[in-house]
Image: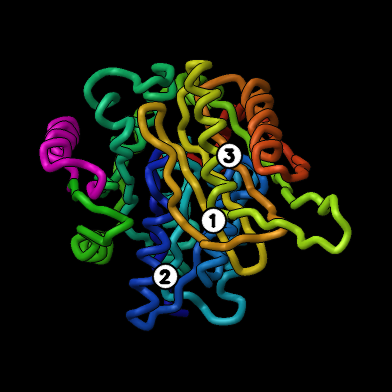
Amino acid sequence: MQRTRLLMIGGFLGAGKTTAIARLARQFTDQGLRVGLVTNDQAYGLVDTHLLRAQGFEVGEVPGACFCCKFDELVETAARLGSNSQPDVILTEPVGSCTDLMATVIQPLQHLFGDRYELGPLTVLCKPEHGRKILGGATGGFSPQAAYIFLKQLEEAQLIVLNKVDRLSPSETNELMRLLQERFPDKPVLAASSTTGEGYEEITTAIAATPGATHEALEIDYDTYAEGEAALGWLNGVARFSCKKPSQPNSDMELFSLDQLVELLIADFSEAMCKAGTEPGHVKVLASAGSGIAVANWVASDEPVELSITSNANVIAAEALINARVHGDPDELAKHVRQSVENIARQLELTCELSSVQHFRPGRPVPVHRFE
């Protein structure tokens, strides 16, 4: 059986992994290759999975814990992607708060399933919004333990990609590249934009040419790692919005903008979080109605809300998937999300229902395997 090339694209919360995976998947598809994707989350109801499927990709999801803690489910999910036609390439996106992937996922795959998969280099995206601060010696609004995870992800990478350079000035890009190269002098470091495609020719060359060779296991303190994850509040939820019935008989029901809904929702939430002094890792809202999809993101307290996908659709009703990962208490996070949903429903004169809400702190990582 021909082996499938398996590539893992990691990075901290908000680093742009989903956009990167979608761009790579399109490039491989344009080359005539069959591509499968696997996403991963601590909870259920992941925006990334819905977004990638909406773009026409075959996507498997491993929910409920990191790849390292659900190794068998990762293997089963990847195998199911080939049920009809074996993929030439599988792209995997681990949880943004996960590290030690070489020892707990990539090397076990190589040793146990090397006849099935050809492992590419562990590629880690550097998030510039927090990278400037953390690489400079600060914590970026996170606890030292959470910042520790950010740095450990980069330390174990076989290829580092400074992402989102389209949003940086040349001097900012140069400074971040300098910080990365000084801290990790033995690692290849590339600059790229998953949005514009800048630097992707170099990335595709690097991930094709670099073997997924094993190396010494990452030196990591699992107590600090667990404390870093436990400092984060995690929330996935579903909100349903709909127009109110017209007060006058035979009147047309007024529509609302799908794009405005997601943008206002995150803007209201981000304002509340900033007032509370809570730093976001990544907050995403995906609203859908029929074939229309709108997505808004917020990735750092000193960054604006971004409407990353526009639908230009006016609708009667919509369902919004909400994924929020912040540095703070999950109960407070849930309270602010509920309040923002109610505020925007009232502002747009809509009815709303928030359901399927999961909010928690991630538990201690307990890998199924760890190869040293």
| Image quadrant where residue 304 sits | top left
State the mark number for residue 167: none
**Where residue 182 sits in the image (x, y, percent)?**
13, 32
Mark 3, residue position = 265
Question: Residue at 68% of width from left, 25% of height from top?
Answer: 335
User: How much space separates mark 3 and mark 1, taking CA atoms?
Assistant: 12 Å
Per the image, label 1 sits on a secondary structure element best described as: strand
**Where residue 146 sits in the image (x, y, percent)?**
43, 24
* Mark 3 nearby-residue class (10 Å; few <14, some 14–19, many ≥20): many
Task: Tell me if residue 325 can be seen.
Answer: yes
Q: Nearer the viewer, mark 3 or mark 2?
A: 3
Identify residue type, mark 3: Leu
Label 3–label 2 contact, CB within 8 A: no
Question: Residue at 34% of width from left, 20% of height from top?
Answer: 139
Dominant secondary structure (helix, strand or loop) of the stretch shown in magenta: helix
**Quarter of the image with the C terminus in it:** top left
Label 2–label 1 contact, CB within 8 A: no
Q: Is residue 225 above or below residue 76?
A: above
Label 3–label 1 contact, CB within 8 A: no
By what rule are the colours in the image chosen?
rainbow
The region drawn magenta spans 165-188
User: How much space separates mark 2 and mark 1, taking CA atoms?
Assistant: 28 Å
Per the image, label 3 sits on a secondary structure element best described as: helix
